[in-house]
Amino acid sequence: LLSEIPAALEAGQFELFYQPLIDFKSGRCNRLEALIRWRHPAHGYVAPHRFIPGAETTSLINDLTAWTTHAAIKQLSEWHAVGLDIGVSVNLSSRDLGKRDFDAMIPDLLNYYGVDGTAIDFEVTESALMHAPENVLSSLEALRRLGSPVSIDDFGQAYSSLTYLARLPATTLKIDQSFALNMQSAPKNEAIIRAAVALAHDLGLETIVEGVETEAQFAMAKRYSSDGAQGYFIAAPMPAADVPSWLSASPLYA
C-alpha cells in the first residue's frame, strides 16, 4: 500500500470524511474533524490505520498532510461561500512540524482560498510531543499566530506531554477515546477523565472527550464538565456532501 500512495495521490483516490464535534455550551456542532479515506480501485475504502502508521515512518506522511490540509481548506471555503459557518480540524504528524515548507504552506493556502485561520484547528497527538519538542513548539506557535486553534490529540496515551503542556501554545485537550470507551466499567478511567478536564481548565484549555459511543458516555462527559465530545453516538465520519444536511437535521445536544 505504501508504494502505491504517490500514484494514488496523483490519481485523486483520497477523500476526506468529516466527523462532528459537539460543543456542550451551545449543544451544536461548531467543528468537524477531517479524516482521510483511500478509495482504492482494488480494495475499496482503505481505513487510515492500514496506511498512516507506515506513512509516518517516511516522507509520504508529509505528502498526505499537504493533500489533507489543502483539501480541508478548500472545502471550508466552499462551505463558507454558501453560508455554512463551520470549522474543521486537521491532524498533523510529528514529521510535519518544524519544517519550513509546512510552516509556509498554511498561510499560503489560507490566503489563496480566503479562509480565516480561526476556522481551521490543527491536531497533534500527544506522542508527537516526544519527538523534537522544540520543533513542535516552533510550528505550533506559527499556527497560533495565524489565529488557528491547536489541539493535543489522544491525551492520555503517553506520559511525556505533562512536561510540555504548560508551555505549548495549545487551545484544546482531546482526551483519548480509550478512557471514554471503558469509563462505565472502570471507575479509575472516570477519575482520569475528571482529572484531565480539571487540569486542562486550570491551564486555560478546552476539553473534548473522544470515542463517545453511548448516551451514558455522552452524559458522563458533560457531567465531568468537558467542553465537548466526539464519537459515533453523535455521528460517524461522513462524506463532505452529507455534512450540510446532517447539520440542518442534527438535534440539539444540550
Image (tube, grey):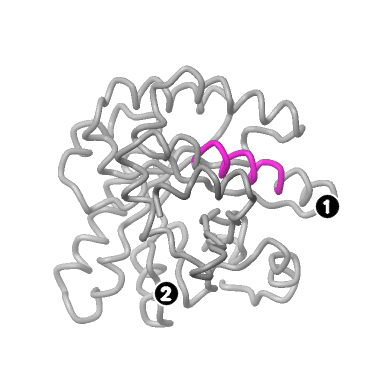
Q: Nearer the viewer, residue 116 or 198?
A: 116
Does residue 216 appear left or right of residue 160 in this picture?
right
Question: CA gap, disc 1 to disc 2?
Answer: 29 Å
Q: Secondary structure at mark 2?
A: helix
Closer to us: mark 1 or mark 2?
A: 1
Q: Position of residue 73 (x, y in %)?
A: 66, 41
Q: Residues within 10 Å of mark 2 (few under 14, many from 20)?
A: many
Residue kind at label 2, given as amino acid type = Phe
- The quadrant of the image that shows the N terminus is bottom left
130 inside magenta stretch: no
Q: How many marks?
A: 2
Residue 55 location, quadrant: top left
Does residue 222 appear left or right of residue 119 in this picture?
left
Which residue position holds label 1? 83
User: What residue sits 84% from the left and 47% below the top?
Assistant: 81
Q: Which residues are magenta?
A: 65-75
Residue kind at label 1, given as amino acid type = Gly
Which residue position holds label 2? 218
User: What residue sits 77% from the left and 54% below the top?
Assistant: 84
